[in-house]
Amino acid sequence: MRVMIAGGGSVGTAIALDLADRHHDVTLLEQMSSHAERLRSLLPGVNVVAADACEYVSLVAVDLRSADVVIAATGDDEDNLVVSWLAKQEFGVPRVIARINNSRNEWLFNESWGVDVAVSTPALITSLVDEAVEVGSIIKLLDLANGRMKLIEVTLAASAPAVANELTLDELHLSDGVRVVTVVRREQPLSPTPTMRFYEHDHVVLITREGAQQDCADAFIG
């Protein structure tokens, strides 16, 4: 798979190294020439180009149209939006992933800006903090399908209907807009089955459609 990464900071370089190790064809664009020169020696197997990824001519030069995935990973949200829009609208890249640096800008990172998947580090860290202290609350982990689907987690309390009533997954009658992805119990991931029962302190990870979270609340929070 051919991947183009915008941004040679710590995030972009870590992604580039990991993808190169997985034998992907990786090109990294770094605006600062001196930094790009250093990265060439630090990133074996990665094509490091000294160029501004926000410039159309730079993207033409690296043949962006042939890329399978673009990752906008700079430390500037405006730059990431510009890269995403150009990649999708001008070059027709099938999959565009964008980094969100400031969670207040999260609402901008959608299909109108060419973003297929938005990854918000601040929001993810907040979710992980919430996960550590919140029982009986819905914690959003990730937006999928341009925000139309959400990956969420619920840590079950003893009072949760699924626990208190000893209901199986099949007996919960979850709507078509809700799917249980996995259940983590005593640090072990379990594949959901129709006869699975739920217990206090289970971590239930679900994919839900936008607006279907109430079904999750009715089953797993009460």
Image (cartoon, helix red, strand yellow):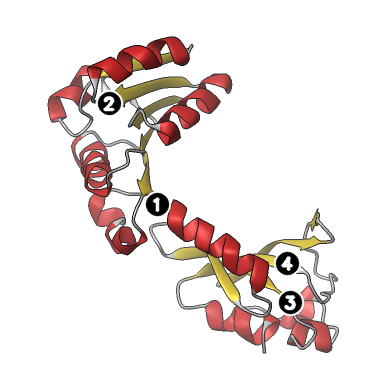
Inter-mark Cα distance, 1 to 3: 28 Å
Neighbour class for label 3 at 10 Å: few (<14), some, many (≥20)?
many
- Give the residue at mark 3: 156
Specify the quadrant that holds the C terminus: bottom right
Residue 126 placement (x, y as % from top left): 51, 63
Which residue sits at x=52%, y=57%?
125
The answer to which of marks 3 and 2 sits earlier in the sequence is: 2
- Give the residue at mark 2: 64
Inter-mark Cα distance, 1 to 2: 20 Å
Residue 148 placement (x, y as % from top left): 42, 65
Inter-mark Cα distance, 3 to 4: 7 Å
Whether residue 144 is visible here, answered yes or no, is: no
Whether residue 46 is visible here, answered yes or no, is: yes
Is there CB contact under 8 Å for labels 3 and 4? yes
Inter-mark Cα distance, 4 to 2: 41 Å
- Give the residue at mark 4: 203
Which residue sits at x=29%, y=55%?
111
Residue 183 placement (x, y as % from top left): 75, 63
State which mark lies toward you, 4 or 2.
4
State which mark lies toward you, 3 or 2.
3
